[in-house]
Amino acid sequence: MKTIVTVTGIRPDFIRMADVFKKLDTAPWCNHILMHTGQHYDKLLSDVFFEDLNIRRPDYNLSIGAAGKTHYQQQADLGPAIIEQLKRDDIEPDIILFLGDSNSVLASVPLRKEGYKIGHIEGGMRSYDERMLEEINRKVCDHVSNFLFVYHENYKQKALREGIPEDKVFVVGNTVVEPLKKMADLNYKGTKEHILLDIHRPENFKYKDRLKSIMDYANYCADKTGKTVKMLKFGRTETALKDFDISMGNVESVDLMGYKDFVRFMQDSLFIISDSGTAQEEPALLNIPVIVPRDFTERPESVENNCSFMLDLNDESSYEDSLAWLHTPPFSGFSDWLGDGKTSSKIVSILKERL
């Protein structure tokens, strides 16, 4: 019997890992231990997603998140917390699985140094934007991992160019497809009564000029479309707006919500303005266009497939171009770059074979 530990800590990762968790739980050849880092620790950012996605309760909650805790404090706490928990309960994992690029994945470094085998789901992603904390996280985790599960061939080639051996890299498709298709009514066309604004990346909220430009653009969209812009309440973004004394104009704040409600909220959007990585994938399955106020993206396939438009905040002509883009021929939505919706089975099958 093999022992597999999964380490997960933030909202998007719970969603992406939902079907992997379930496949591991029911695999007769392994014992699955689910660790919640506690990086997202309030109900709307963690607990509700276990309920919506029918995920069982974690075996351990390491509770490393806290209001005002910095990213480096979280990282400093998490590695020792995992190692101490494993040793305290005499757990000897055959592999420890991480997903994505949150602060949690940097625990892979002390774990690898302790001799544990590491797997990284969502490997090979690169924005090549060094302002992104996530870019640092994902690179480091890739290079200490024994297994990289990548979403498609382009990500594999990026990993290989960095010297990662090919026998460590497996193309499996995108894990977000399975939970979203189960949660959404794909025949529902939506009311299209609002524009969804989702801004939470440090490279946007840490810089006054960028954050002001985003709010100006959101109000520009409201004026041009006659639709209300509804902005998700993320604490650090709200704090930055206040600290920089940036007016929201006619933009309305809305509370964070559970996954099922959020999927319907996306479907009711005319379009989405978001700096989220996941927002360049989920809406493609829902046929909702996304405008991305970033200089770089780790998901260029979304742009290449006409699912997303990269907004240049330094060029006001890009504002007009973005709204014109909304009227281009419909994009294809679900396509090869998202995989075939069987990712969790592929990952578990590879683990069974290779472990």
Image (cartoon, rainbow, N blue to C red):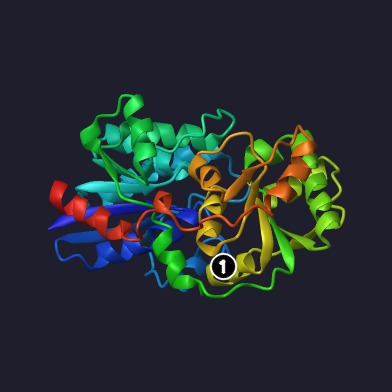
Is residue 218 left or right of 45 when viewed as pictured?
A: right
The residue depicted at 78 percent of the width and 44 percent of the height is 320
- Give the answer, above or below, for where 331 lies relative to 216: below
Q: Position of residue 264 (x, y in %)?
A: 60, 71
Q: Position of residue 342 (x, y in %)?
A: 31, 60
Q: Position of residue 51 (x, y in %)?
A: 47, 73
Nearest the viewer among 147 and 63 is: 147
Q: Residue furthest front?
A: 329
- Give the answer, above or below, for where 300 lies relative to 198: above
The reply to whether residue 79 is visible in this rendering is yes
Q: Which residue is tagged 1?
A: 263
Is residue 203 left or right of 161 when viewed as pictured?
A: right
**Amino acid type for the residue under numbered disc 1:** Val
The residue depicted at 24 percent of the width and 40 percent of the height is 116
The reply to whether residue 109 is visible in this rendering is no
- Give the answer, above or below, for where 128 lies relative to 351: above
Which quadrant of the rendered structure holds the N terminus? Answer: bottom left
Nearest the viewer among 271 and 348 is: 271
Q: Secondary structure at mark 1?
A: helix
Is residue 304 left or right of 227 when viewed as pictured?
A: left
Q: Position of residue 118 (x, y in %)?
A: 28, 41
Is residue 213 left or right of 281 when viewed as pictured?
A: right
